[in-house]
Image (cartoon, rainbow, N blue to C red):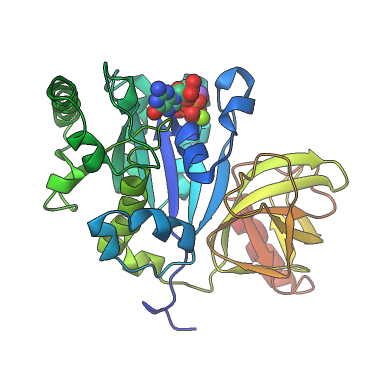
Amino acid sequence: AARTRDHLRSPIICILGHVDTGKTKILDRIRRTNVQDAEAGGITQQIGATYFPIEAVKKEATKIEEGKKLLYNVPSLLIIDTPGHESFTNLRSRGSSLCDIAILVVDIMHGLEPQTRESIDLLKMRKTPFIVALNKIDRMYDWKAQPHNCPTRASLEKQPSHVREEFFRRVKETKLQLAEIGFNTELYWENKDVRKTVSLVPTSAITGEGMPDLLMLLMALPQRLLTERLMFTDVLEATVLEVKVIEGLGTTIDIVLTGGTIHEGDTIMVVGLDGPIVTTIRALLTPHPMKEMRVKGQYLHHKQIKAAQGIKISADGLEKAVAGTQLMVVEDANDEEEMEYVREEVMKD
Ligand code: GTP
Ligand code: MG
Ligand code: NA
């Protein structure tokens, strides 16, 4: 099928930043879930994936004027949560390698921290466009929280002048820190050129302030910069995120499908500890919309799934599969030439 502007895949968005800046809590606020409360020590230790249907995104994003002018022409947003703890550099790297754009979360009370800088280096290396969420605005002294996921500017207007002063002082400090490492930044409503200047969006994951603004920017940025990249292609691209034993399913793999379409019954090849594993997809599963892939729950069964999506695959022989590697589909398992080619491709990692 020809690649066209009328057939776009879901953008993949990765959320990166220093530990405890509120990455998971922001997703919880948008999903209306409590994933973060259930994490051991409140620390994320895995990559997660959540599918946000476009209608849910539109409902929030159109609370602001800029959001009313956008096209809602992708099936969904696929958001990848990553750990901020310093020991998980490999997972941040994996997450950032999968995404089209990123949200870099900075605690407005702390400014840039070590893993903020590490995350920026990853994004720089891959030339990934990103926005910065200045989170925890509600922590500023005397902040008057506004209800119902209030857009940021509406909330700022309601703050007493000394709170607004503190806000602008902190924004300025973070802008200076980002300028020192080579990034021009502006509060998003003052940003005239998203190609040259990174947008800042003030948020609170606890009060919900700024959530409409954040979702609006996640729709706007790909539309301005990435339409070409998001045109749907038939070329299958998928990465194994996790290998997990699930009661009733045996060993499964969680993958992110970044391109193409995958089907129940497809023959797949993945990297194994003792060499390539060839197996047949028994079940293609996803969590429900707005539910996190890494949380145990009820799965939806599918006959086929189009990119981009986080998927759990159940199949025989996955016990020794290796996370972080490519998955490929084999067209014809009896074709020795093809098998050899796929084997080489898969084992490249
Ligand atoms: P890691 O994944 O472990 O790196 O952390 P994280 O960035 O996902 O942060 P997390 O969502 O675990 O939040 C860390 C702590 O900050 C929790 O106690 C949250 O309740 C709190 N928190 C997150 N966002 C906000 C916010 O906007 N305001 C306030 N006051 N607290 C927040
Ligand atoms: Mg987290
Ligand atoms: Na945390």
Left or right, 61 with respect to 176, comes to right
Image quadrant in which you'd find residue 288: bottom right
Position of residue 318 in the picture relative to residue 125 (left or right): right
- Going 20% across and 29% down the picture, which residue do you hit? 159
Considering every residue shown, the one lying at the far right of the view is: 248
Q: Is residue 349 visible?
A: no
Q: Please name whichever residue, 42 or 339, is drawn nearer the observer in this view of the structure.
A: 42
Q: Nearer the viewer, residue 20 or 195?
A: 20
Task: Tell me residue 192's x, y (percent).
Answer: 11, 52
Across and down, in percent, residue 18 comes to 40, 24
Image point (45%, 33%), residue name: 23
On screen, residue 171 versus residue 329, left or right, reads: left
Residue 169 in the image, given as x and y percentages of width and height: 13, 22
Q: Is residue 121 above or below residue 43?
A: below
Image: 182 above or below 173: below
Relative to 227, say whether 323 is above or below: above
Q: Measuring 54% from the left and 42% from the top, which residue is drawn there?
A: 32
